[in-house]
Image (tube, grey):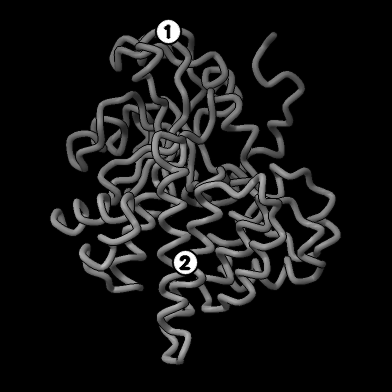
Amino acid sequence: MKPFENFDWKSFWDNSDGYTDDYTGKAPTDQEILDIEKETGYKLPESYIELIKHQNGGIPVNNVVTTDNICINLVGIYGIDKDKKDSICGDSGTDFWLKEWGYPAIGLTVADTISGGHDMVFLDYSECGPEGEPMVVLVDQEDDYSQEILADNFEEFICKLESDRVITDIEEFKQLDSEKQVLALNKILIMKGTRDMIELLEQAEASSYSEEVLGMLASAYNSVDQEDLALQTLDLVSEANRDALWYYRYGYAYAGKSKTADNAHHEKKKAAVKNLEKAIELAEGSSEEDVIDYCMKIFDKILELKPADLRSGYRLAYTYYNHYYRED
């Protein structure tokens, strides 16, 4: 099937902005497409070719991409007109970002963001090879060039673009399926902040939410020092579904509560360590191994422990924290 079947290109591009001149080039010929592929050494995806044949780069009306982990704002999408600064082979094209900014040679820069070059969107050929179908990834220059998958292919990436509007009405939010609810909350967190997310979710009973949403709400409460609300929210998660992240969040809440100087200070600290030990146990060898690093930071920055404080009764916590502490 042809890429972008029945796609509305007329409403896709925003050609009202003066910056469009840096991106939008003349319509490419088939020979020019072949020349770019030869110059770069990469076969362009059919869906990308379809896009540039409608318009050779430019600024999209909908410019936000959200994943489970991040939300980014695009500025423009690169075309292949080399006379345009912001194009794949232009003055601010792939070679520029690799040579001047140190980005990894994984493929082609295909879009930039409002970060001003501190993260860039790439067609990533590292797994498929130069003739294959590349994924679309965000490479974060400020995080040691870490990569976040935005879409499995270019067509999916374009179809995921949405407006920068965030949901503020709980009834609209409840109409979304669980996956889209998580994406909507990530978008609010990044574009508006933690308190806006809490304000939305407090419009309904917490018990009405999925366990993933409950976890996000509890994390939000922890981050604004409302640990009791975090604990109450986490208690709504069924015991069968209390994973490493759940125990980390529970331990985080008790760690925050332990900062209050009262008669229960030591008991709260003990409860924090107990839950973090369980989080480490569940995270070992699982897809949640990042949780172990999160726990180390709680021991260090909030609980202000030394490895010796964990030696008795917390084997895993002591082992990992001893290694972390020495490296730090």
* Disc nearer the start of the sequence (2/1): 1
Which amino acid, by three-letter code, is at mark 1? Gln
**Which SS class for mark 1?**
helix
Is residue 129 in sight in this rendering?
A: yes
Residue 211 spot, x, y in % from top left: 69, 51
For the point 45% across and 78% down, the residue is 267
Specify the farthest residue to the left: 326
Residue 124 spot, x, y in % from top left: 39, 25
Q: Nearer the viewer, residue 272 or 97?
A: 272
The image shows residue 115, relative to residue 299, as above or below, that is above
**Which SS class for mark 2?**
helix
For the point 27% across and 36% down, the residue is 91
Q: Nearer the viewer, residue 239 or 98?
A: 239
Q: In the rendered image, which quarter contains the N terminus?
A: top right
The image shows residue 176, relative to residue 222, as above or below, that is above
**Which disc, if any, is residue 252?**
2
The image shows residue 152, relative to residue 145, as above or below, that is above
Q: Nearer the viewer, residue 290 or 179?
A: 290
Number of numbered discs: 2
- The residue identified by callout 1 is 31
The image shows residue 176, relative to residue 138, as above or below, that is below
